[in-house]
Amino acid sequence: MTLCHVRPTPARFVDTLAPADRGGTRAVERIGACIARLTMKMRVLITGGAGFIGSHLADELLEHGYGVRVLDSLVSQVHGPERRRPRYLSPDVELVEGDVRDPDAVRRALQGIDAVYHLAARVGVGQSMYEVAEYTSVNNLGSAVLLEALISYPVQRLVVASSMSIYGEGLYRDRHEQIHDRVQRTPDQLARGDWEPRGADGGGLTPVPTPETKAPVLASLYALSKYDQERMCLLVGATYRIPTVALRLFNVYGPRQALSNPYTGVLAIFAARYLNGKPPLIFEDGQQRRDFVHVRDVAAGCRLALEVDGAIGGVFNLASGEARTIRAIADRMAEALGMSIVPRLTGQYRIGDIRHCLAELGLARRVLGYQPRVDLGAGLGELASWLATQTAIDRVDDMHAELAERGLAR
Ligand code: UD1
């Protein structure tokens, strides 16, 4: 098997220079210009690229001189009933409208492409527990169709978006300094409103940063499908020598997050409530902790996964490395919006929800050179400015009713 494209290296460019140009700053400038020109020609396909994370990744890649094509089916849960090309998508992005499960659409989208980001997926944990066929079809079959196409059209890099959901609960330490990696809350405990995970002896546990080596605990169809996507890509990548990298994204937030999709993205869900003059509904006691990472940091991490050769075959957390409680997040969002609405603690819980998960970022920092830069205050301020230009339809009550009716929120 031969690769269709070989990425030029700086060394090859030195060979193209006139001998007089090979030393000093002139050579450095010429090499830089050559790399910039040739990188411009590197064309990247993002499946699911018209969505929140994909569109920011497209901006990041365009800024760094790549050409970007997107394959997206513009699902109505994200893009509204009109399913039009989103206005936020850069005009420099070529959009191929199509389903990742459609082999013809995928083959068309791959023409002339050098690298692929696979982001196309359905993304609601609760919803995945009843739309089982749909989630399995889009996430698993969609990946399978893409991979079959890549076997006959290998690219220089495949980057797959996996998720922190595959960890289930994050890593915990008990009072004897023992580490626990398969913590799960019991149904009885949740029914009692006893929210914190406990060790086998009933003792309390402290959450600690979760590294990529933690054993997966797949607690939802969504998590299972994300794990499948990750493993399928790495397996096919290794077999057919398609350099592949998997990224486990934590709780991503930022402008363009779908405001009318009540199934995912707690910050967008809370914002939609506030903008409609209603209190956010907080599950449990609001003391559950998550690692919120700004979408531009995630986009930068995704670009590094394409550019850093040492990343090939690896799996990396992309997060901020800081844990926040959901209650604090609700309050900070209200503050950023200049609102004084007090969130409502429902005492209900979502089946499959975890209590705490915080990322260990050592591997991503060391290998990718990843560095989260957007601090939460600045990120929320920017989100609030963007929200001021948006209309948010609040469907949270419908979502709560839908989950409750199915016994998935209690
Ligand atoms: C989940 C996945 C994550 C995935 C993301 C996108 C897990 C552990 N995590 O994140 O990998 O990328 O979905 O689908 O499976 N909450 C409320 N009120 C609401 C909505 C949410 O209190 O109206 C709470 C939830 O109970 C949860 C937290 O906010 O404790 C975060 O919820 P959410 O934004 O849905 O994301 P996760 O479930 O953490």
Image: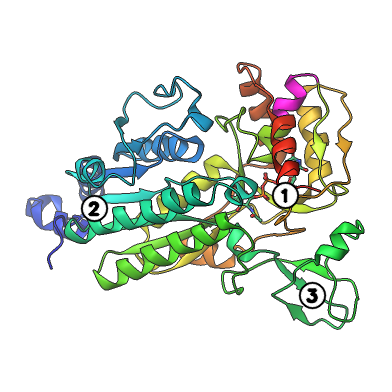
Which residue is denoted by mark 2 in the rendering? Answer: 24
Q: Is residue 324 above or below residue 242?
A: above
- Circles 2 and 1 in contact, beta carbons < 8 Å: no
| Mark 1 Cβ inside 8 Å of ligand 1 | no
- Circles 3 and 2 in contact, beta carbons < 8 Å: no
- Is residue 65 part of the magenta span, yes or no? no
Dominant secondary structure of the residues highlighted in magenta in the image: helix
Q: Nearer the viewer, residue 81 or 229?
A: 81
Which quadrant holds residue 214?
Answer: bottom right
Between the C-alphas of marks 2 and 1, the distance is: 66 Å
Q: Is residue 367 visible?
A: yes
Residue density around tag 1, few if under 14, some if 14–19, many if 20 or more, within 10 Å: some
Between marks 2 and 1 in the image, the one whose residue lies nearer the viewer? 1
Q: Residue furthest front?
A: 405
Judged from the image, the secondary structure of the residue bearing numbered disc 1 is loop
Judged from the image, the secondary structure of the residue bearing numbered disc 3 is strand
Which residue is denoted by mark 3 in the rendering? Answer: 173
Q: Nearer the viewer, residue 246 or 194?
A: 194
Mark 3 or mark 2: name the one nearer the start of the chain: 2
Q: Is residue 236 above or below residue 119?
A: below
| Residue type of the residue flagged with mark 1 | Leu
**Start-end of magenta stretch:** 271-277
Which residue is denoted by mark 1 in the rendering? Answer: 408
| Residue type of the residue flagged with mark 2 | Gly
